[in-house]
Image (spheres, rainbow, N blue to C red):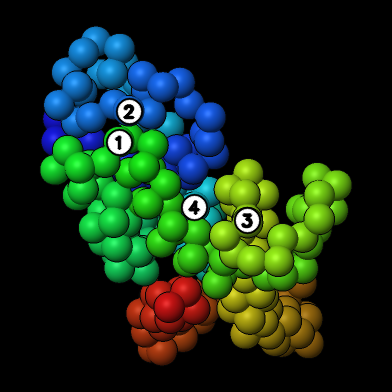
Amino acid sequence: MTRQLIIGMLCYAPIFAIAESLPTNWSTLKVSQMGSPVSLFVVLTFLSIIPFLVIATTTFTRNIVVLSLVRQALGLQQTPPNIVLIVLAMFLTLFVMAPVLEKSYEQGVKPFMANKITVQEAGTQSWLPLRDFMVVQTHESDLRLIHELAKAPLPNTVEELSPVRLIPAFMLSELTTAFKIGFVIFLPFLIIDLIVASILMSLGMIMVPPVTISLPIKIMLFLLIDGWGLIAQALVRSAS
């Protein structure tokens, strides 16, 4: 139960940060009271939406999009399988988010487990490191766009940022960054496809699909330059 609570507090910090007006009996809840049926139901409900918050508040979106684009650039349909890409993207996300999650644990979850603060206070304190990380990774143009759509003025300080507006801006920035990286990855593979297609056309082999020749060439070159290692380094360093 303790391990589930720790994971839940770290992943659900945005929810606690959004819920500014909680009922008194909930906001004063202590860890010693977590054994009640209602409290257990709330915690388990929170745990059920962990994947959505992982996608929304971490670099997982960037990682999985780039890895999927690499697979498409190579011309492979289902290799590597989706589950392999998802697991790899998750571990790359953990490498990047480990310092942020550790800080969230120290500021929010640890005091809560020591019965020093309430759930609402723990959620707020756990949210702050995530917020700071997301602000650094979010483009100002995306943040301005979300506030314009919400018809709200752009805040002057980071402390005034609402999670409801920061999270979608962060996700837009992650998608933009992922597609920029994917564009750079696609270019050399596109050039190989064009060269192979031109050679086949010049030889009059118009009935031979270019992918039949270009696919093994692209895989060979990708392995020679240690492509997966370079992509992993690029993803981790781009978010550091």
Residue 237 visible in the current orientation: yes
Give, as a three-letter code, the residue at label 3: Leu
Which residue position holds label 3? Answer: 161
Of tags 2 and 3, which is closer to the observer?
Answer: 2
| C-alpha distance separating marks 1 and 2 | 5 Å
Judging from the image, what secondary structure is the residue with disc 3 in?
A: loop
Where residue 94 appears, as percent x and y from the top left, is: 32, 61
Task: Check disc 4 and report its element: helix, strand or loop.
Answer: helix
Percent across and percent down for residue 149 are 84, 48
Q: Are marks 1 and 2 in contact (CB under 8 Å)?
A: yes
Numbered tag placed on residue 57 in the rendering? 4
Query: In this orientation, does residue 216 appear?
Result: no
Q: Residue at x 36, y 69 (%)?
A: 96
Q: Marks 2/3: CA distance?
A: 25 Å
What's under tag 4, amino acid-wise? Answer: Thr
Check disc 2 and report the residue beneath it.
28
In this orientation, which residue lies closer to the viewer: 105 or 88?
Answer: 105
Left-right relation of 125 to 145: left
Q: Which quarter of the rendered picture does the C terminus lie within?
A: bottom left
- Measured as percent of width and height from the top left, residue 116 is found at 20, 42
Q: CA distance from mark 4 to mark 3?
A: 14 Å
Q: Earlier in the sequence, mark 3 or mark 1?
A: 1
- Which residue carries the number 1 mark? 118
